[in-house]
Image (cartoon, helix red, strand yellow):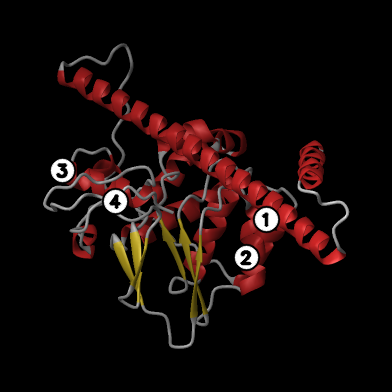
């Protein structure tokens, strides 16, 4: 209100200087409209500046988090190379492939509705059900390629859902507005399911249940928040520890490590979490060749080029350095 009053005071003073008072009604109305639109324009510009500043600060903080993680990884590798552990007991490496559960869970629409009803009453899914869902989800994701082709039926639609970030209410609103997954409505959830919001666990578990129930109509890409180092600082680790335990956190990441990197719809539209690449010679076939899995994600089986490709697919603030192209890379930020 203070900002509005100040703008109104400034506008009144300006109109007085311009000889506003005493003009005919039409001229007075035009003057009022001109100053009001000017005030609206200034407010819109301030909103855009604040939004850009917030995004820049958020991306900068995430970049520093990833940078710290890389430095710690290099230090750990250096200690291992010298045969030292720095007083810490080294953790066993994660398996290259997720374990196949004895019986794959088969969620139904009725069981999913019951799950949602419990979530809305702030009830946690029992840890046994959580383990079964996550193990099954990891198996399903590991069987998918890095780039998944989507060919929805003629007349159907693909609903692409961006960053949910633990907001269960948003996910339920989307499902109730556009309908449950079906041949007519195919969903592609484009990464960043966790962190920031209070219901990251519930969102991932619900998406996996929907994926198991409707595998052809529910799809998931990996985002930059499906990463351990990010989860430590942005809330998902704390949520897992408060609702379950650290082993469950690792089970969630057994799913994240195998999430596809991109989807291509009808051979025409490519969808991944981050923005456009900084160079022109990146091909879909190059993304298709990228390996996934826990061991690969520790950067031991990727070239420098491959690491930058993956980072550019999930991080908006990473840009691939030009290798073959002589044109100047674009500096435009991703979406």
Q: Can residue 268 be seen in this view?
A: yes
Left or right side of 109 for 213: left
The residue identified by callout 2 is 174
The residue identified by callout 4 is 330
Q: Earlier in the sequence, mark 3 or mark 1?
A: 1
Tell me if label 1 and label 4 are in contact, CB under 8 Å.
no
Judge the density around disc 4: few (<14), some (14-19), many (≥20) Cα neighbours within 10 Å.
few
Q: Which of marks 2 and 3 is nearer the N terminus?
A: 2
Give the residue at the far bottom of this rendering: 154
Badge nearest the viewer, 4 or 3: 4
Q: Earlier in the sequence, mark 1 or mark 4?
A: 1
Image quadrant in which the N terminus is located: top right
Q: Earlier in the sequence, mark 1 or mark 2?
A: 1
Q: What element carries label 4?
A: loop
Q: Is residue 168 above or below residue 17?
A: below
Left or right side of 9 for 181: left
The residue identified by callout 1 is 169
Real-space CA distance between mark 1 and mark 2, rounded to the nearest whole angstrom: 9 Å
The part of the image, by quadrant, that contains residue 4 is top right
Q: Which mark is residue 257?
A: none
Real-space CA distance between mark 2 and mark 3, rounded to the nearest whole angstrom: 39 Å
Badge nearest the viewer, 1 or 4: 4
Q: Residue 303 carries which label?
A: 3
Q: Is mark 1 on a helix, strand or loop?
A: helix
Q: What element carries label 3?
A: loop
Closer to the camera in the image, 242 or 334: 334
Real-space CA distance between mark 4 and mark 3, rounded to the nearest whole angstrom: 23 Å
Closer to the camera in the image, 327 or 14: 14
Q: Earlier in the sequence, mark 4 or mark 2?
A: 2
Real-space CA distance between mark 3 and mark 1, rounded to the nearest whole angstrom: 40 Å
Judge the density around disc 1: few (<14), some (14-19), many (≥20) Cα neighbours within 10 Å.
few
Real-space CA distance between mark 1 and mark 4, rounded to the nearest whole angstrom: 37 Å
């Amino acid at each position: 209100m203070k900002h509005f009053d100040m703008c109104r005071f400034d506008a009144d003073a300006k109109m007085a200087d311009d000889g506003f008072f005493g003009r005919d009604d039409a001229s007075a109305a035009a003057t009022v409209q001109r100053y009001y639109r000017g005030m609206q324009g200034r407010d819109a510009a301030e909103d855009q500046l604040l939004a850009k500043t917030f995004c820049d600060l958020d991306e900068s903080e995430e970049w520093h988090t990833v940078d710290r993680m890389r430095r710690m990884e290099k230090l750990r590798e250096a200690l291992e190379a010298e045969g030292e552990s720095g007083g810490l007991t080294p953790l066993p490496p994660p398996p290259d492939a997720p374990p196949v559960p004895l019986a794959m869970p088969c969620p139904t629409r009725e069981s999913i509705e019951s799950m949602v009803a419990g979530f809305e009453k702030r009830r946690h899914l029992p840890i046994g059900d959580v383990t079964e869902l996550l193990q099954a989800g990891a198996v399903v994701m590991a069987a998918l390629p890095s780039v998944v082709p989507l060919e929805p039926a003629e007349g159907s639609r693909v609903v692409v859902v961006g960053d949910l970030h633990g907001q269960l209410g948003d996910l339920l609103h989307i499902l109730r507005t556009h309908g449950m997954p079906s041949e007519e409505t195919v969903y592609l959830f484009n990464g960043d399911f966790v962190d920031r919001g209070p219901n990251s666990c519930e969102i991932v578990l619900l998406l996996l249940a929907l994926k198991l129930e409707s595998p052809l109509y529910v799809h998931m890409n990996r985002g930059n928040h499906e990463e351990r180092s990010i989860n430590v600082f942005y809330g998902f680790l704390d949520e897992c520890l408060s609702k379950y335990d650290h082993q469950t956190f690792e089970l969630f990441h057994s799913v994240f490590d195998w999430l596809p990197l991109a989807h291509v719809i009808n051979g025409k539209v490519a969808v991944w979490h981050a923005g456009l690449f900084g160079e022109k010679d990146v091909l879909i076939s190059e993304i298709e060749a990228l390996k996934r899995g826990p061991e690969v994600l520790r950067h031991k089986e990727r070239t420098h080029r491959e690491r930058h490709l993956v980072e550019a697919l999930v991080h908006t603030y990473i840009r691939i350095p030009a290798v073959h192209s002589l044109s100047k890379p674009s500096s435009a930020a991703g979406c």
